[in-house]
Image (cartoon, helix red, strand yellow):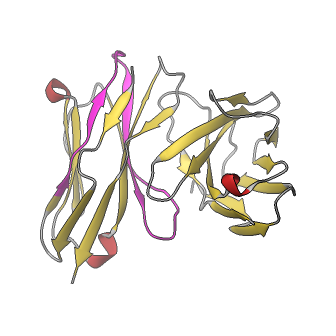
Amino acid sequence: GAVVSQHPSWVICKSGTSVKIECRSLDFQATTMFWYRQFPKQSLMLMATSNEGSKATYEQGVEKDKFLINHASLTLSTLTVTSAHPEDSSFYICSASLSGGVQETQYFGPGTRLLVL
Amino acid sequence: AQKVTQAQTEISVVEKEDVTLDCVYETRDTTYYLFWYKQPPSGELVFLIRRNSFDEQNEISGRYSWNFQKSTSSFNFTITASQVVDSAVYFCALRDLEYGNKLVFGAGTILRVKS
C-alpha cells in the first residue's frame, strides 16, 4: 500500500516551454500533497503544499506564477513549470499523505528529473 | 526553530560491518514526529520508520534499528551487517505542529557499502 507515482520520470525541454508533472496516489486518497525540489547532492526543499480543492500554499521564495500547482482530485496533483529556464533543471519529487496531519507519514513518488536546455 | 542535523556527510564501510547514522533535531514542540527515509540511486524516497515524541522505545526491524533519546534530541539509525544494497542516501526528518506539519529534512548521509 501507500504507492505514489509520478509522470514523467524524465523530461528534457527547451528554454521557454512549460512542463507539467503529475503526481498520483495509487492506492489511497491523499488530502494533502507536497512538492519538493532537490538539487544534486543536496537535501529536499519543500516548494509548496497542496490540499485537494484549494489553492496551494507556497514556501517563501517560491514563485507561485512560475510553479503552478493544481490538486483537483484526491488522487492527483500537478506541478507545471511555466516558461522553464536552465536554472529550473532539478529533481522534482512529490509526496502524499492521507490528511496532512502531523502524525501522518508522507509517501514519496519516484521523482521527475527535469533538464531545461 | 525546527532543525535536523546529520553531521555525517558520507560514510564508507565494508560489507558486514555495522554502521550508525546520526540524527540530532531541534524543536520547541512537545508533540513531534521523526522519520527516516532511504534514497537509493534511483531517486525514490523509501519510508523506513516514523516515531512520535512520546514513544522512546527503541525499535528493531530486521537489520535496522533505531535509538530515540529525547534527553539528547537524537534519533540514530543503525544498520547491522551492512550489505551493498544498503548503499544510498539516508535522510532524517522532523515534523511538528509549530512548523505547520511540514517535513524538515536533514542534509542526508551518503552511505557507501563496499563488497
Residue B84, how many percent across, how many down? 28, 77
Residue A50, visible in the rendered structure: yes
Residue A82, how many percent across, how many down? 84, 48
Q: How many marks?
A: 0
Q: Quadrant of residue B16?
A: bottom left
In reply to whether residue B37 is colored magenta, the answer given is yes
In reply to whether residue B73 is colored magenta, the answer given is no
Q: Is residue B27 left or right of residue B105?
A: left
> What are the residue bounds of the magenta stretch?
B20-48
Q: Quadrant of residue A14?
A: bottom right
Residue B88, how many percent across, how many down? 36, 65
Q: Is residue B39 above or below residue A79?
A: below
Residue A25, visible in the rendered structure: no
Q: Is residue B85 above or below residue B27?
A: below
Residue at the spot 37% in from the left edge and 60% down from the top edge: B89
Q: Foreground residue, B102 or A20?
A: A20
Q: Is residue B16 left or right of residue A80?
A: left
Residue A94, how many percent across, how many down? 63, 49
The quadrant of the image that shows the N terminus of chain B is top left
Hey, which residue is sitting farthest left in the picture? B17
Hey, which residue is sitting farthest right in the picture? A17
Q: Foreground residue, B20 or B67?
A: B20
The quadrant of the image that shows the C terminus of chain B is bottom left
Q: Is residue A31 above or below residue B101?
A: below
Residue at the spot 31% in from the left edge and 69% down from the top edge: B86
Q: Is residue A28 left or right of residue B17?
A: right
